[in-house]
Image (cartoon, grey):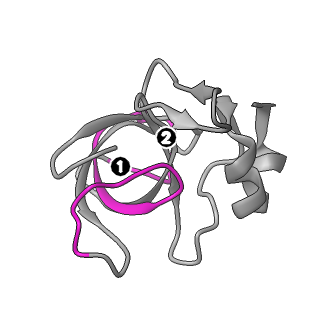
Amino acid sequence: MLQHESRVNVADNSGAKRVMVIQKLGGSNKSLVHQGQVAVVVVKDSDLTRKKTYKSTLHRALVIRSKISLARTATFRIRFDETAVILVNKRNLPLGSRIRGPVLQELCEKFPFIGTLSQIII
């Protein structure tokens, strides 16, 4: 779960390292962003060798990992060590070409490109 002005790590190779959440996208008036939802972010720290993202630029981000546990079955819950996002464009296609770290299987079914870019699917 992310709220306004939360700072999170970026898990792809688009060039951004850390971003800050500005606004949630979607029809609900609730301000929290959960796994599998898209938010508007601003880049706070970036790698200068990449040309896709620069510091202080606005992008859309898809949340792929969260510290808040997610119930898979009645007795089994999954929780990650960090909250991470990947940067996407207006058509929800990724800006990077690789995703670092594990990704949930439910997200791979919802967004097919995540399964092809990630190395570990849980």
Regarding mark 1 in the picture, which secondary structure is present there? loop
What residue is shown at x 41% (from left), y 28% (from top)?
Answer: 67
In-image side of 67 versus 41 (left or right): right
Q: Which residues fall within the magenta stretch? A: 29-54
Near mark 1 (Cα within 10 A), the count class, few <14, some 14-19 or many ≥20, is some
The total of numbered circles placed on residues is 2
Is residue 47 shown in magenta?
Answer: yes
In-image side of 113 versus 24 (left or right): right
What residue is shown at x 27% (from left), y 55% (from top)?
Answer: 32
Number of the label disc, if any, that sits on residue 54: 1
In the picture of the structure, the residue carrying the numbered disc 2 is: 15
Decide which of tag 2 and tag 1 comes sooner along the chain. 2
Question: Could you tell me if residue 39 is visible in this image?
Answer: yes
| Image location (x, y in percent) of residue 112 | 79, 60
Q: Amino acid at mark 2?
A: Gly
Looking at the image, which is closer to me, 88 or 29? 29
In-image side of 11 versus 72 (left or right): left
Rendered position, 83 above or below 62: above
Task: Specify the quadrant of the image occupied by residue 39.
Answer: bottom left
| Image location (x, y in percent) of residue 6 | 21, 41
Residue found at the very far front of the displayed protein: 74
In-image side of 20 versus 79 (left or right): left
Is residue 58 shown in magenta?
Answer: no
Secondary structure mostly seen in magenta is loop
